[in-house]
Amino acid sequence: MKHLLTTITVATTLTACGPFAVCTPNETRCTGTLVEVCDADGQWDLAEDCAAVSGDEEPLWMCCPVPADELGPAGHACLPAADACPAEGE
Amino acid sequence: MAAPPTPAHVIALWDAMRARYGTRIVDKSSAAEMKLVGWFLERIGVLDQATFLERFTTTIGRRIYVPFTPGTPTPRHSLWSQLVICVHEHQHVEQLGRDGAVTFSLRYLASPAARAAYEADAYRCNLELHHWHTGQLPSPRELAERLRSYGVRDADIDVAETTLIAAARTVKAGGVITPASKFAIAWLREHAPELEHRGAA
């Protein structure tokens, strides 16, 4: 019983405090075909599923690291698989 | 430069998307529940009731409360903006179907980060439609700034901008991300191809 109460107390405390931050807000990454963005609470959130992107010629799309450009700072995005990932290897 | 939409285009796209998603349009200004929501938002200091009723379209479940009559342009809601709003709101219906009504509603209402993520996802439709129509990309920052009216934090707006920058890069490369835009663009290409920017492939 004591063990159960302790478990409930710890679980409630952790829940009340919310999840621990696991990433830095605005950070981006590729996880397989997924582009993920770190939200303001420090949690990874799905931004785009490249497998679900469609284009005129229905190419395969993949998650790529992208250098800074006129749209914004370096990050990750779904791009056509036919094009080499522009920032790959950097 | 692409042709501007006509009232018939707007009405027909709304009809097509309503049929696809099983949604219903409700006149926001005469909906008692929207007046109540507007009163509540004014009381908690988010925005005043008149602004909520006149400027914002609101989707609850499969009911879309619009502050205009589709196909009738107003100074605040041009025909093109009515097309974009149609797609944006139906992306929220996609989210509802994807996450389930309970999860979607709880996350949207309780978490500013989740609310910002849902809205950034829907604002991807604005970006996709704008690019299809003009060949240009709207500023991700300006789109993200629109979230200020949604009771989110500055940090959520920054994350929304990051999400929209990623989307803009995909759209620039010729991709369409959101299911609602995929349906709308396919429909527009079939029924209103003159609205697509002329530089399109």
Image (cartoon, coloured by chain):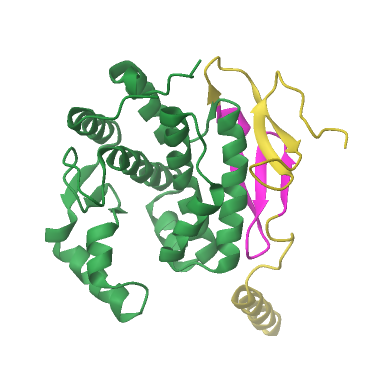
Residue nearest the observer in this picture, B162 or B115: B162
Task: Identify the colour of chain B in the image.
Answer: green
Q: Position of residue A18 (x, y in %)?
A: 62, 71
Of B107 and A6, nearer the camera is B107
Whether residue B43 is situated above or below residue B114 in the rendered picture: below
Image coordinates for residue A15, horizontal then vertical, percent: 61, 73
- Residue at the extreme front of the image, as rendered: B1
> What's the magenta region?
A27-53
Which chain did the renderer colour yellow?
A
Q: Which residue in the rendered view is the most extreme toward the left?
A: B30
Q: Nearer the viewer, residue A43 or B125?
A: B125
Q: Residue B68 location in percent, x, y?
A: 19, 49
Q: Is residue B175 left or right of residue B89?
A: right
Residue B108: x and y, percent?
Answer: 44, 60
In the figure, is residue B55 to the left or right of B161? left
Q: Quadrant of the N terminus of chain B?
A: top left
Residue at the image position 54 percent from the left and 69 percent from the top: B153
Residue B58, quarter of picture = bottom left
Magenta segment includes A37: yes
> Left or right: B106 with respect to B54?
right
Question: How many labels were placed on the picture?
Answer: 0
Q: Is residue B145 magenta?
A: no
Placement of A34 over or under B154, stated as above or below: above
| Residue that extends furthest to the right in the rendered view of this protein | A89
Q: Residue at x 20, y 48 (%)?
A: B74
In the rendered image, the vertical position of residue B82 relative to residue B36, given as above or below: above
- Residue at image coords 15%, 59%: B29
The answer to which of B167 and B61 lies nearer the viewer is: B167
